[in-house]
Image (spheres, coloured by chain):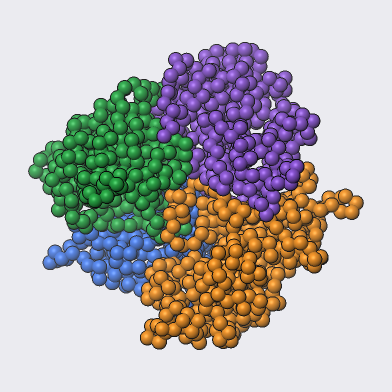
Chain colours: A orange, B purple, C green, D blue
Amino acid sequence: MNLCMYLPNGQSDVKVRAGIIGATGYAGAEIVRLLAAHPNVEIAWIGSRSNAGETLSSIYKNLFRIVDLPLVDHEDPEPEVTADLPVREAILKLAQDVDVIFTATPQGACAQLVSEELLSGTRVIDLSADFRLKDVAVYEKWYGIQHAAPEFIREAVYGLTELNREKIRETRLLANPGCYTTCSILTAYPLIAEGLIDPDTLIIDALSGVSGAGRGAKTANLYSEVNESVKAYGVAGHRHTPEIEEQLTYARRQKDAEAAPVLVNFTPHLIPMNRGILATEYASLVKDGDGAPVTDDRVRAAYEKYYGNEPFIRILGAGSCPETRFVEGSNYVDIGWKIDLRTGRIIAMGALDNLMKGAASQAVQNMNVMFGLPENAGISMIPMVP
Amino acid sequence: MNLCMYLPNGQSDVKVRAGIIGATGYAGAEIVRLLAAHPNVEIAWIGSRSNAGETLSSIYKNLFRIVDLPLVDHEDPEPEVTADLPVREAILKLAQDVDVIFTATPQGACAQLVSEELLSGTRVIDLSADFRLKDVAVYEKWYGIQHAAPEFIREAVYGLTELNREKIRETRLLANPGCYTTCSILTAYPLIAEGLIDPDTLIIDALSGVSGAGRGAKTANLYSEVNESVKAYGVAGHRHTPEIEEQLTYARRQKDAEAAPVLVNFTPHLIPMNRGILATEYASLVKDGDGAPVTDDRVRAAYEKYYGNEPFIRILGAGSCPETRFVEGSNYVDIGWKIDLRTGRIIAMGALDNLMKGAASQAVQNMNVMFGLPENAGISMIPMVP
Amino acid sequence: MNLCMYLPNGQSDVKVRAGIIGATGYAGAEIVRLLAAHPNVEIAWIGSRSNAGETLSSIYKNLFRIVDLPLVDHEDPEPEVTADLPVREAILKLAQDVDVIFTATPQGACAQLVSEELLSGTRVIDLSADFRLKDVAVYEKWYGIQHAAPEFIREAVYGLTELNREKIRETRLLANPGCYTTCSILTAYPLIAEGLIDPDTLIIDALSGVSGAGRGAKTANLYSEVNESVKAYGVAGHRHTPEIEEQLTYARRQKDAEAAPVLVNFTPHLIPMNRGILATEYASLVKDGDGAPVTDDRVRAAYEKYYGNEPFIRILGAGSCPETRFVEGSNYVDIGWKIDLRTGRIIAMGALDNLMKGAASQAVQNMNVMFGLPENAGISMIPMVP
Amino acid sequence: MNLCMYLPNGQSDVKVRAGIIGATGYAGAEIVRLLAAHPNVEIAWIGSRSNAGETLSSIYKNLFRIVDLPLVDHEDPEPEVTADLPVREAILKLAQDVDVIFTATPQGACAQLVSEELLSGTRVIDLSADFRLKDVAVYEKWYGIQHAAPEFIREAVYGLTELNREKIRETRLLANPGCYTTCSILTAYPLIAEGLIDPDTLIIDALSGVSGAGRGAKTANLYSEVNESVKAYGVAGHRHTPEIEEQLTYARRQKDAEAAPVLVNFTPHLIPMNRGILATEYASLVKDGDGAPVTDDRVRAAYEKYYGNEPFIRILGAGSCPETRFVEGSNYVDIGWKIDLRTGRIIAMGALDNLMKGAASQAVQNMNVMFGLPENAGISMIPMVP
């Protein structure tokens, strides 16, 4: 029994003071839930534009008697002081009090508030897509909005912890990955980086629980519209596509720096469940020089090379199909695969909890790395079944 | 408003007497439900080995006061007469009374009871896989059992009504297709038959509600094991694969009788909902002689050519994603697609109700064709939303 | 096997032309679905304020190729003609074309459009609460709005078909009951009318699927807010309470015209499922003169007296617990009960489909009665399991 | 923000060695999950009769890489040694190694293995009903089995931690309460003990998620049998009834030691969700001497008196309806109520997670008390929403 990763919570004396913008969305509220139980964090304030003045626990009653802070409006945190200030200056009032700000906000919002002055005193972990893509033109094309702070894109670090740990340590601006992308990239990365599959054949078919669609009051996400049904959406046009492609291009260029960008088909589906993402990925295995097919051993070796020592990635092995229930409520990603000798393809599968490793707990994992805390502090929960 | 297909129920005076073997499974009970309201059918008897003597309505209380027949044991229908008879002779007692027998039984059961004497007097519609595959070796390999009546495979007609209507009219032995296969084949068939895609690139990613797993008391299908989770299963080895491949090979050979068999990757997933199958299919579009990509118009034309006059196949069109809720409780198949110019692939999607068009209502549709009834008799229900 | 109720659809030559106001809500769309397959109905027009100009089938794609009428705005049906008219006059344009109008509209809307002129030419079946309560003061207190047409309350007939069939035949204005109320009243009515229980002890604990909350875009009804949870709501204040109490008071006054009004505790709960209402009702059984407890036989006799010949009420019997799945998609109400000798109480239980017998199919049942059609025409569907 | 209860995990140096019998059921596996992350516990062994030899993590893959112990057969833990021993002697082999044994076993199993010798060296926390009822005749009547160790009933302590904390500290044999009962009793106890309601009018209507039905392979608990439906079951006969009645009788006798036993109507319902119990309880409020009705203030005072300092009971207050999602994954019980002045009744509502406070986390809470650990050690998780 390997319990080592569950033992030494709180072994660090560091205390990080944190603020959360966008706390009433599912990802924001999940960050609050995690930080409230984190041994090295004090929550300084939590923010919401639409519910400013209320307590978060009047909406998320799971937090009743646990987090009873009032919600502040980050664009107007102290009305008598900040009423006439632009957002970038108003937010500095809130920033004075904290070491880190989490932004769980709609696309574009974080870019509007970052500034050199902000980042000089406070680190920012952004859960939106604002700083995930290095090419601002790609961002503006897929998201359809102008980027308000392109000058910070370069320094932002893409927060797939397992792939970028060293850069994450030092960054002031962390671009936390999307839920689909975390799952899709982690499942395919070693196979591409180790040259086992032809990236041009990669097809990612992904299934998501409904919490990924957010807490906005939209008819399409009503219980009776979603329950007892399944559909694809955003086919050949979902915004997570370029994020996946950029990261997998880095994988491809591990062996050939001149390799063409990876293009994938990424098809998300909405599934009637609260949490969870499953990515089923198809690609043709490369042939060896002698034409021998890639074996399960080589696939396993590739995954072990990248994730063998990772506390939060579990390699289930050949023939094993991950299930979202087995990662629910945790920071784990489970990966399995099957080689089909008939067609020469591999089917690789990854599963995670979209609000945890796909959003909030990965954000906390990144915070832990950024502040030198034990990487599993506050996020070592065992998945809950059923 | 096109109501024509809903009007003339009961316009035929024919009365077909039917028996159902395996009535306590979900597909069997669904056939009983459909036949009980069918204007041209009388249910003569319903059978179940495990619940013989009980009424079906004591189990399926939706049928209370509607179908109150007792269940008979088809291997021993009249204990004092048939106790010592082998199955093939015992079943003749039941067959005397009916024009058609539906077998909604485990693999192998139907093959054990068909005989020349049975088929001389009664037509059989088999919902198992026993007579779906023309190559008995393929059957025995994928199902792992010896075929008990290979001599009838040749005459059996594969009951995808829309593709085989003429042959269905005359057959004595109808092999009703599987649920995944009906959806997978109908979605891809015109694209292959019209040469729009490269069949060797075809990947079928399919999602199914849990009723497809049957009513057997298995831990894996308990509510708390299936709910709030999703998984792939039978990856690269699901039994519906050869059935899909055989039919799609026929499609490919429409233009080239010598073409190689189609091999596909077919990956089913279990989704927490009762009913419904969604197939998301990926394939590379062929290039024209001049290198121009295939257009939506050509895709639509292909679907229209095959299904334009079909009452139960609805072509939703380019950019439209079918949802299982919009076919639930009906015999419809909804098909949509999206061309991805970036990758040169088409994503074609089909949706149906696995217990209806994927099993029971297609069986009734085939019965209607076999007995010269209006094809929509008893199966023209409008899908129920939500 | 009793199939008689399923056979002779379409035996009447009558054609009723119908219009539906509020067709994009769940109840309204369900009426359209039922009428589209009804052998004696032609749908003349369907209305929606918010989606006027669109087709209903672009929203409810289950109706694709089946009902492709555009939606009209009932407050402005012919813009060039009706733009300046008040609602009551504008609606007369639409009324000219139909025999019956169904109003599946928010509280107050139907009262605003009925007029003597309208009712002179067209019959109205209102699915809102506007004409259900005979005491306008009670209506205005519980619904918090002023009644716009109290002069029609008196003539309106409460459409619990099984209890008011004769009055329904003749009425111009039918007040279709609420979903909770249909279930609650039918379960308790015979027990009170026959004097078997003490009405002052009656407690109604009810569970409803989420479609009962409507299709409005409210955060509280999002999938991820409702799924995997259950709650009571409207405790001691739900609007269906006075409707239940008024009808059960009539029951009580069957034997004693001077009896006090019935007051009940009615507690609705929201359950994570699409359809279905279950009412679990508790009451103390009366003692006979000799102190002997009420028996199952007497309970059954009471139910048989009221419902023994009813096609759509199924008396399951003593010790039998109705399940909503066994009535789903149908017009049935299933009723069972259990006597607890330890406490001297009866627990009576009723189940129905809230969008069918709780709304749309009961509205059609009432229409059938009003127009002399077979009472089961268009609504004889067998419940669908699973 | 009150974070105090989340901080000082691991503040005790005590290490408790634990064994779990029945680890493959939902409650047993939940205990393992909790203990694996408990700062003061080492899991010595885990047991299962049906899966002996396998690892628990091959079944509960959420535990993969976390708990990889093999399962032992508690009736035959060391085959070469214990094969011929009766259960009570065989279990002593396992008991040598641990301080506490949790039994998450079917009714009757725990009674068969306890003995003076066992309890002399090891404390037992039993999650079955074997030692919950003080009257062995009541046990044998409601459970239909003979009690194998009635001599230990007297010393067993009923483990509703909040009501029996002092006795729990010292006991060797802890009878952990049922899930329905924990919720039902805690909600009603203060109201009865403080004399605010008439216990003879108490009706408990309860709703449970499906995990409460266990992990046995029963058709009735299949996904497609349970999903999209709701039903009452065990009406007027559920086994948790006498347990509720016994404890509430103690409440009644707080003020009058001679008071009659409490008899209740308890009606459980099965709801399509994994976890959660909601109890909706109805009772007539007593009248004061001056006839004034009981007020919300007096109700609140009663709850505050009993639970005001309890870390795991949250008094939501008047007019507030608890929702199971807000306690899911936690040890909390949320309680709210509504007074209905029209009928003179109170509707009190309680919610908990049936596998946590209703089983496993309450068992761990009791273990913490028994071993002098911080009461919240290992069970202070914040509920997870959605």
* Quadrant in which the N terminus of chain D appears: bottom left
With A196 as the anchor, is D240 left or right in this view? left
Q: From what the image shows, is residue A117 above or below residue D321?
A: below
Residue A99 visible (yes or no): no
Residue appearing at x 40%, y 39% in the figure: C69
Q: Position of residue A37 (x, y in %)?
A: 52, 74
Residue D338 visible (yes or no): yes
Q: Position of residue B215 (x, y in %)?
A: 55, 38
With D313 as the anchor, is D193 left or right in this view? left
Based on the displayed image, in which of its 4 quarters is residue B81 positioned? top right
Residue appearing at x 32%, y 68% in the figure: D317
Q: From what the image shows, is residue B30 above or below residue D272?
A: above
Foreground: D231 or B329? Answer: B329
Q: From what the image shows, is residue D293 above or below residue B126?
A: below
Looking at the image, the residue that sits furthest to the right is A290
Q: Position of residue B341 (x, y in %)?
A: 66, 52
Foreground: A307 or C30? Answer: C30
Residue appearing at x 42%, y 73% in the figure: A49
Based on the displayed image, in which of its 4 quarters is residue C238 positioned? bottom left
Tell how many labels. Answer: 0
With D102 as the anchor, is D129 left or right in this view? left
Foreground: B199 or B295? Answer: B295
Q: Position of residue C52 (x, y in %)?
A: 37, 48
Residue appearing at x 45%, y 75% in the figure: A47
Looking at the image, the residue that sits furthest to the front is C80
Q: From what the image shows, is residue A73 above or below residue D131?
A: below
